[in-house]
Image (tube, rainbow, N blue to C red):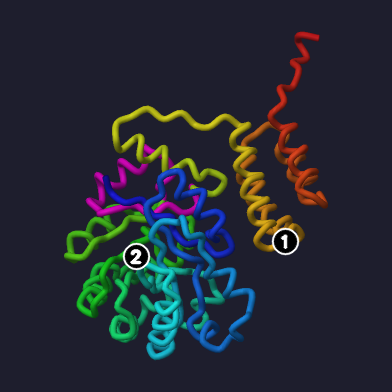
Amino acid sequence: MPDLYLAPMAGITDQVFRRLCFEQGCDRATTEMVSAQGYLTAPPDRNAYRFLLARFPEEGPLAAQVFGSEPLFMARAAAKLTDLGLFSSIDINMGCPAQKVVGGQSGSALMKDPPLAAEIVRQVKRATPLPVTVKMRLGWDDAHKNAVDFAKALEAAGTDLLTVHGRTRAQQYAGKADWEMIAQVKQAVSIPVIANGDITDGQSALNALRVTGCDGLAIGRAALGNPWIFAEIKATLSGKPYTPPPFSQVIDTAMRQAREMAAWKGERSALLEMRKHFAWYTAGRRNSAQARTKVNLASSFDEVEALLRALDTPVPSPFYE
């Protein structure tokens, strides 16, 4: 059975959400991305990094993801993260398409500078005994799809594993992921390759593995409001039937996530952060748009739960009054 990874997503893949995914069959996960320079220069008690790097003891293998464009800073950050004793590997972000990241020549901007990307890997490898992995894309844009050569350069520099998102930076998250090009990367290197992009259910996971020949799959946006996707994929890959949870269980899980986040960060902060999660958990339900508007105005989780439970109440048919 290939490993299933929860792909890192800024503002989403914190310890509370990751634990839900591990419980449903996720094998490995990655922290939200951490700025190397910011982490090295921030005060020790800064909440942002304390929250970003927090993990529950019962989580499975967890990589710390770091981004930056200065090899020395990246190496020092990797060493500092290693010393925390919390992580199974160091993951270097060379795939994020956000302007605030690529504007600093980090993330997917590194795909335009393979020598610098390779030097970052070499420096990080020297700084940590942990495996060093890289998250990358197919290239900067359609005219510069250099994923195969880029992957070879990273392998030569010492990368232990690659996760390849099947889109260019220019595509962001639009269009169709190119699994065939991920397959070319897999064929070109001898290290493990994890496929990422358009893996939304059990059947698409099976198809992605058949096309790419990869060693595992990384699931990102499809897990939003649906940590059960890992159980679904594992069932499909095992040839077993899968039954989605009833909506009452979906609400139970959403409220568990909310209250665990409140215990961690306080209810006010948790209320704000959970708004997007509530929207994902209720997507597609009848009257969910109106409920989400009310949820965003709610002042307590008790109020939120009442609104969500109402969505699970059958609406009387006008034909049987």
Comes first in the chain, label 1 or label 2: 2
Q: Is residue 6 above or below residue 48?
A: above
Q: Residue pushed farthest top?
A: 320
Q: Which quadrant: the C terminus?
A: top right
Residue 99 location, quadrant: bottom right
Looking at the rendered structure, which numbered label has been put on residue 266? 1
**Nearest to the observer: residue 190 or residue 243:** 243
How busy is the neighbourhood of tag 2: few (under 14 within 10 Å), some, or many (20 plus)? many
For the residues labelled 1 and 2, say whether their Cβ atoms are less than 8 Å apart. no
Q: Which quadrant: the N terminus?
A: top left
Q: Which residues are magenta?
A: 198-222
At numbered mark 1, what does the secondary structure look like: helix, strand or loop?
A: loop
At numbered mark 2, what does the secondary structure look like: helix, strand or loop?
A: loop
Q: Amino acid at mark 1?
A: Gly
**210 with respect to 227 (left or right):** left
**Nearest to the observer: residue 256 or residue 136:** 256
Q: Is residue 212 magenta?
A: yes
Residue 5 rendering spot, x and y as whole percentages: 39, 55
Looking at the rendered structure, which numbered label has been put on residue 138? 2
**Residue visible at 58% across and 73% down in the picture:** 50
Q: Amino acid at mark 2?
A: Leu
Residue 86 rendering spot, x and y as whole percentages: 43, 69
**Residue visible at 63% across and 38% down in the picture:** 252
